[in-house]
């Protein structure tokens, strides 16, 4: 009797663009050889797919006739998208979304019921972004900041899907600091989101911020095509209190008064009054030119000003004002700024750092600055601030 040969079945694992299966790796394609076994063929489907795929969606890999042992999704630079398998091991979904204008290679290893394994590869390319949204970020990486420093992101284009953007923002602190994001309008008119603690930071707190925005659609403002990250440290607890009624400024550090100096604040009774409330030192700008026309004041002046410390975008500074020496500690006669004698201003300039709060009080002031006028979030209660989150 002539023996009847047993049939030999070759298992093919395939990756697909959209839902169309592709052949598994074999000799003559990329050099890999698929295992063979007596199983029925397993197939792999990948979405999105094609050469102009939709961006801003997760990558999904699905196996039929087997389970997924390993999945890698990498862009042209070798950056990978992390993902999670389903409970039955038949589906894998990326945590991050596919970015616009990017090419991805999907490598999937499948295992059948008998233990046979095969590897398949496929590629897809997402459509390019019609508009790119970018971020202006504060504070900078590696900075040491004051206890009132917020985390602030200002966007080049409008953010109409604020919730989608806020979901991609992560703040990690060394001591579990409580805080919240809040959406406001920047002084420039652009959309802005800040994160502030419930109370001033504790000195020594280390902060890491990650904005995993690559592949996020901001709405009408377009797509984000990169991630952002920064790390900073909180310095000593320094608070500058300014009593415009007493015409005195006091710097306290770690709860103790360091020095009190005479000042002259904004002239009462009109547009030259100072802001009250809490303003945060934005930057030490040194010697700058101040022009009254840039802040809408009628009395023209254009002068060089030393030891300039910016407190608001609208033009309130603490700075040297030798032309007002005779009024220091006696009367408020400035155009809205906190003026000091040269030596006092130079001393304070050397002591403070961006993020230090200036807590200003006085009867005849023009109110508190808006949250977007510098870093004015501290003029709201924490409950009021949290209400500005897009996720509440």
Image (cartoon, rainbow, N blue to C red):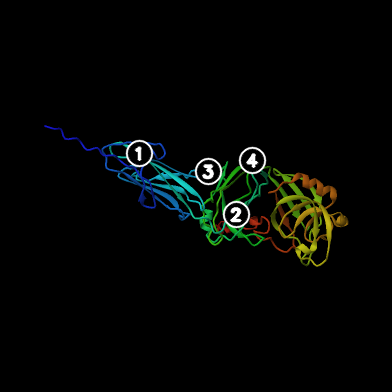
Sort mark 1 into few (<14), some (14-19) or many (20+) by Cα contacts within 10 Å. Answer: many
Circle on res. 118 = 1
Q: Which residue is mark 2?
A: 134
Q: Quick one: SS at disc 1?
A: strand
Mark 2–mark 3 Cα distance, whole angstroms, equals: 21 Å
Q: Which residue is mark 4?
A: 204
- Sequence-first tag of 1 and 4: 1
Mark 4–mark 2 Cα distance, whole angstroms, equals: 30 Å
Q: Quick one: SS at disc 2?
A: loop
At x 75% / y 60%, what residue is drawn? 274
Mark 2 against mark 3, which lies toward the viewer? Answer: 3
Q: Which residue is mark 3?
A: 77
Sort mark 2 into few (<14), some (14-19) or many (20+) by Cα contacts within 10 Å. Answer: many
Q: Are marks 2 and 3 in contact (CB under 8 Å)?
A: no
Tell me where residue 193 appears, x and y as whole percent: 59, 56
Up the image or down, 105 lies above or below 323; here it is above
Sort mark 4 into few (<14), some (14-19) or many (20+) by Cα contacts within 10 Å. Answer: some
Mark 2 against mark 1, which lies toward the viewer? Answer: 1
Q: Nearer the viewer, residue 19 or 341?
A: 19
Q: Quick one: SS at disc 3?
A: loop
In this rendering, position of residue 314 left or right of residue 84: right
Mark 3–mark 4 Cα distance, whole angstroms, equals: 37 Å
Q: Nearer the viewer, residue 213 or 8?
A: 8
């Amino acid at each position: 009797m002539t023996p009847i040969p047993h049939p030999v079945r070759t298992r093919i694992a395939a990756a697909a663009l959209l839902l169309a299966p592709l052949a598994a790796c074999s000799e003559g394609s990329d050099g890999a050889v698929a295992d063979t076994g007596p199983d029925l063929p397993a197939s792999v489907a990948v979405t999105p797919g094609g050469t102009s795929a939709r961006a801003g969606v997760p990558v999904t890999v699905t196996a039929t006739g087997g389970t997924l042992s390993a999945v890698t999704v990498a862009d042209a630079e070798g950056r990978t998208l992390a993902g999670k398998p389903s409970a039955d091991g038949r589906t894998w979904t990326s945590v991050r979304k596919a970015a616009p204008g990017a090419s991805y290679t999907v490598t999937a290893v499948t295992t059948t019921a008998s233990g046979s394994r095969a590897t398949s590869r496929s590629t897809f390319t997402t459509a390019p972004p019609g508009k790119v949204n970018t971020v202006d970020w504060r504070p900078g990486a590696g900075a040491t900041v004051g206890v009132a420093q917020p985390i602030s992101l200002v966007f080049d284009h409008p953010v109409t899907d604020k919730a989608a953007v806020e979901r991609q923002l992560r703040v990690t602190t060394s001591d579990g600091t409580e805080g919240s994001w809040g959406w406001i309008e920047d002084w420039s008119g652009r959309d802005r989101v800040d994160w502030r603690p419930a109370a001033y930071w504790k000195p020594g707190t280390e902060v890491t911020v990650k904005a995993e925005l690559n592949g996020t659609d901001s709405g009408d403002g377009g797509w984000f095509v990169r991630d952002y990250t920064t790390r900073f440290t909180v310095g000593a607890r320094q608070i500058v209190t300014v009593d415009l009624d007493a015409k005195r400024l006091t710097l306290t550090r770690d709860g103790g008064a360091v020095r009190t100096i005479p000042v002259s604040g904004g002239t009462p009774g009109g547009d030259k009054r100072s802001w009250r409330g809490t303003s945060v030192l934005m930057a030490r700008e040194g010697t700058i030119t101040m022009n009254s026309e840039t802040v809408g004041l009628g009395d023209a002046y254009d002068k060089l000003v030393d030891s300039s410390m910016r407190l608001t975008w609208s033009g309130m500074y603490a700075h040297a004002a030798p032309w007002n020496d005779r009024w220091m500690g006696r009367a408020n006669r400035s155009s809205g700024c906190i003026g000091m004698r040269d030596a006092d201003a130079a001393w304070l300039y050397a002591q403070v750092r961006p993020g230090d709060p200036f807590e200003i009080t006085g009867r005849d002031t023009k109110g508190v600055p808006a949250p977007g006028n510098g870093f004015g979030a501290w003029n709201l209660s924490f409950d009021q601030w949290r209400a500005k989150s897009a996720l509440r």
